[in-house]
Image (cartoon, helix red, strand yellow):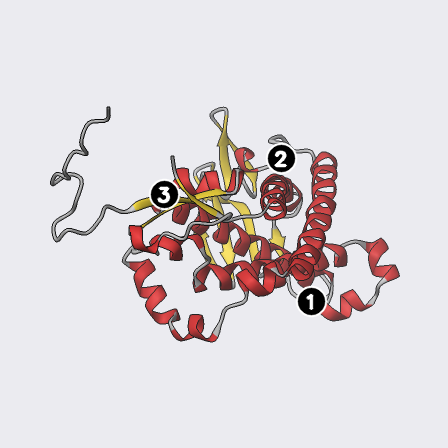
């Protein structure tokens, strides 16, 4: 014989008699999105570190058809600081900064070494342009193919239109979303399981602008591809301009990754990682807002 139900206590029922919230497990990311994401994680890190190895072979950027050594857009070097000492300098748009120990001049095994980016930021860590190029070209093709497959699947499967394209309502509330993020107020409940407008715009910028720019400018720097597709040089204004745009796009992607990781840490890293690894994402909603169905079930 079963015992009578225990009446609710203050711990069971919040003030005002409202029922406690429930935790719902839903699918946030499909298998294709998750696979594409993790392939890109590996490819982008390998591309970044091997790209800096290549950059170190000539740590300067220019604009136009040829190298204008007198007017670099960006340059890193070691200069005589007097008294037999060297200092690292970085020149950006005509302005020079002292970056000793990080850029232009780094310390390795207790000795000052002239190099653009330090050893810990390059793949391989030692100077080896040929190996860096092999790593870079392999992962560049992996990145390009993975991106093309992801974009095709997103278009055909409706992911781009359904999940990433901002609606008019999204755009009307963009100011409020920016203000909420500045105050570290993130969406809750079912809204947390969807992309907000800032995420949509950031992801679209990476997928449709920065990614293609990286691939096309990389192709422009290849003499063989230039011979087959000379329009690439016209499109980007020369090989040196393409190299500068390639570096700028890579820098923006790094900025995106940093902001993305900070947002993941601030908005619940375990839940976010679980969603991107298994697809299972937990939302906490009032009991009356729970939506039972195939795609969502109350967490046991």
User: What percent of the width, then of the height, locates residue 36?
Assistant: 63, 46
- Single out the mark in the foreground, 3 or 2: 3
Image: 54 above or below 178: above
Q: Which residue reaches farthest right?
A: 228
Lower sequence index among marks 3 and 1: 1
Left or right of residue 289: residue 105: right
Quadrant for the C terminus, please: top left
Q: Secondary structure at mark 3?
A: loop
Residue under pointer 3: 268
Q: Secondary structure at mark 1?
A: loop
User: What percent of the width, then of the height, locates residue 65?
Assistant: 73, 65
- Single out the mark in the foreground, 1 or 2: 2
Left or right of residue 264: residue 242: right
Number of residues whose C-alpha sits closer than 10 Å to that of mark 3, classed few (under 14), some (14–19) or many (20 or more):
few
Left or right of residue 95: residue 136: right
Query: Are circles 1 and 2 on residues that touch, CB within 8 Å?
Result: no
Number of residues whose C-alpha sits closer than 10 Å to that of mark 1, classed few (under 14), some (14–19) or many (20 or more):
some
Lower sequence index among marks 3 and 2: 2
Left or right of residue 35: residue 103: left
Residue at figure coordinates x 68%, y 55% from the top left: 153
Question: In whole angstroms, how far apart are the C-alphas of marks 3 and 2?
Answer: 32 Å
Write down the quadrant of residue 235 in the picture.
bottom right
Number of residues whose C-alpha sits closer than 10 Å to that of mark 2, classed few (under 14), some (14–19) or many (20 or more):
many
Residue at figure coordinates x 76%, y 56% from the top left: 219
Between 240 and 277, the residue placed more toward the observer is 277
Write down the quadrant of residue 70 in the picture.
bottom right
Residue under pointer 1: 64
Residue at figure coordinates x 44%, y 44% from the top left: 281
Image: 175 above or below 213: below
User: What percent of the width, then of the height, locates residue 88?
Assistant: 48, 44
Between 190 and 214, the residue placed more toward the observer is 190
Residue under pointer 2: 123
């Amino acid at each position: 014989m079963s015992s009578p139900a225990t009446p609710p206590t203050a711990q069971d029922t919040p003030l005002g008699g409202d029922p406690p919230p429930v935790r719902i497990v839903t699918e946030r990311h499909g298998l294709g999105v998750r696979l594409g994401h993790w392939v890109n994680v590996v490819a982008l890190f390998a591309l970044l570190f091997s790209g800096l190895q290549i950059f170190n072979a000539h740590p300067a950027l220019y604009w136009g058809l040829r190298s204008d050594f007198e007017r670099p857009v960006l340059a890193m070097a070691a200069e005589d600081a007097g008294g037999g000492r060297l200092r690292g300098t970085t020149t950006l748009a005509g302005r020079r900064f002292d970056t000793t120990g990080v850029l232009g001049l780094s310390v390795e095994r207790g000795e000052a070494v002239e190099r653009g980016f330090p050893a810990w930021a390059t793949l391989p860590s030692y100077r080896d342009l040929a190996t860096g190029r092999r790593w870079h070209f392999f992962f560049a093709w992996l990145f390009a193919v993975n991106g093309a497959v992801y974009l095709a699947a997103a278009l055909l499967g409706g992911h781009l239109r359904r999940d990433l394209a901002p609606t008019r309502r999204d755009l009307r509330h963009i100011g409020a979303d920016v203000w909420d993020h500045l105050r570290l107020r993130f969406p809750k409940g079912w809204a947390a399981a969807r992309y907000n407008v800032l995420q949509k715009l950031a992801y679209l910028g990476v997928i449709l602008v920065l990614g293609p720019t990286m691939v096309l400018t990389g192709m422009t720097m290849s003499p063989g591809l230039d011979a087959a597709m000379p329009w690439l040089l016209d499109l980007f204004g020369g090989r040196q301009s393409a190299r500068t745009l390639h570096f700028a796009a890579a820098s923006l992607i790094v900025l995106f990754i940093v902001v993305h990781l900070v947002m993941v840490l601030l908005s619940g890293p375990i839940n976010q990682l679980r969603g991107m690894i298994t697809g299972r994402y937990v939302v906490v909603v009032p009991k009356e807002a729970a939506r039972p169905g195939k795609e969502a079930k109350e967490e046991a």
